[in-house]
Amino acid sequence: MSEAKTPLWDGPTRLFHWSLAALILASWLTAGKSMEWHKLCGYAVLGLIVFRLWWGVAGGSTARFASFLKGPKTTLAYVSSLGSRAPGETAGHNPLGAWSVTLMLLLIALQAGLGLFATDIDGIESGPLSDKVDFDTGRLFSQWHELAFRVLQGLIGLHLAAIAFYAVWKRENLVGPMITGARRFGAAVTPLKKAPLWSLAVGIVLGAAFAYAVAKGFRIKL
Ligand code: HEM
Ligand code: HEM
């Protein structure tokens, strides 16, 4: 095993990940209790998702969707190799993890998106776009919002179980690299290629602008 650590996750991807996890936790804890905070967390989640979509096409090499989304053949071949205790040698998401995190990102976007139209029972603590739909439809969005969260909880559970599986079965620590950005590999791998600073700036502006606009229900007077 080579001694030097290979960089694999860039700073923005790591910051995105831990902010997202913290905000999902905060949305969960505030739901039905402190709705002002619940909604603020939700807008921040939507801003993060917009940033991540941008970063998925113009970010560091390992954050790009084109670099990690693989077809069914490659994914199934990877699944059939899961029983092997040999550690993975991909600097980035493996083909199965890639689909699971993409699904998680889409579900989180749907979750927060449904919240925008959700109407609570007395119509007071509602999403900023709930006036676009009638009361009964708003209540329906509310139910879907809760249902989506049950599915999301399942996916997050699976995410954590997968990480534990790698730690125990493959003796592979995936969490360390999501904190430090680098790890040692047994073989030569293609290291992370960082994105330019301007791309990060564009991503931050896009994410922040979207979060602001959505918080205002897209009713912005310039
Ligand atoms: C609400 C909780 C969480 C959510 C929604 C979440 C979501 C995600 C997402 C979307 C990614 C893909 C990152 C990207 O490419 O942008 C990811 C990766 C990752 N997450 Fe989480 N995460 C959560 C909690 C955690 C926790 C608590 C841990 C640590 C125990 C963790 C460890 C990791 C690791 C190690 C990866 C990289 C996996 C790999 O090597 O392919 N996550 N997570
Ligand atoms: C990913 C982020 C989000 C998560 C994880 C989440 C989760 C939840 C959960 C679990 C509930 C059910 C609370 C209960 O009745 O016990 C809830 C309720 C609610 N959420 Fe969210 N939410 C998120 C984002 C949003 C956003 C962006 C909005 C709107 C700005 C929103 C608006 C609402 C409203 C209005 C309710 C109350 C619905 C009712 O009383 O029937 N949520 N949320």
Image: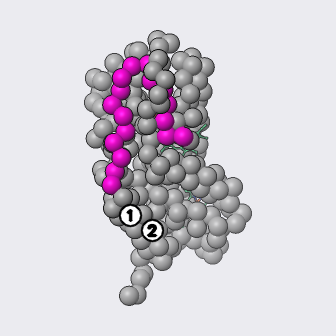
Q: Is residue 86 visible?
A: yes
Q: Residue at x 61, y 52 (%)?
A: 22
- Per the image, the residue denoted by label 1 is 201
Label 1 Cα crowd, 10 Å radius (few <14 / some 14-19 / many 20+): few
Mark 1 vs mark 2: in front: 1
Q: Does the Cβ of the disc 2 residue fall within 8 Å of ligand 2?
A: no
Decide: is 182 above or below 45. Answer: above
Q: Secondary structure at mark 1?
A: helix
- Per the image, the residue denoted by label 2 is 208
Specify the amino acid type for callout 1: Ala
Q: Quadrant of residue 219?
A: bottom left
Specify the amino acid type for callout 2: Ala
Decide: is 153 above or below 204. Answer: above
Which of 142/12 is in front?
12
The question of residue 176 being in magenta is answered with: no
For the stretch drawn in magenta, the main secondary structure is: loop
N-term mark: 1 or 2: 1
- Real-space Cα separation, disc 1 to disc 2, in angstroms: 11 Å
Residue stretch in magenta: 180-196
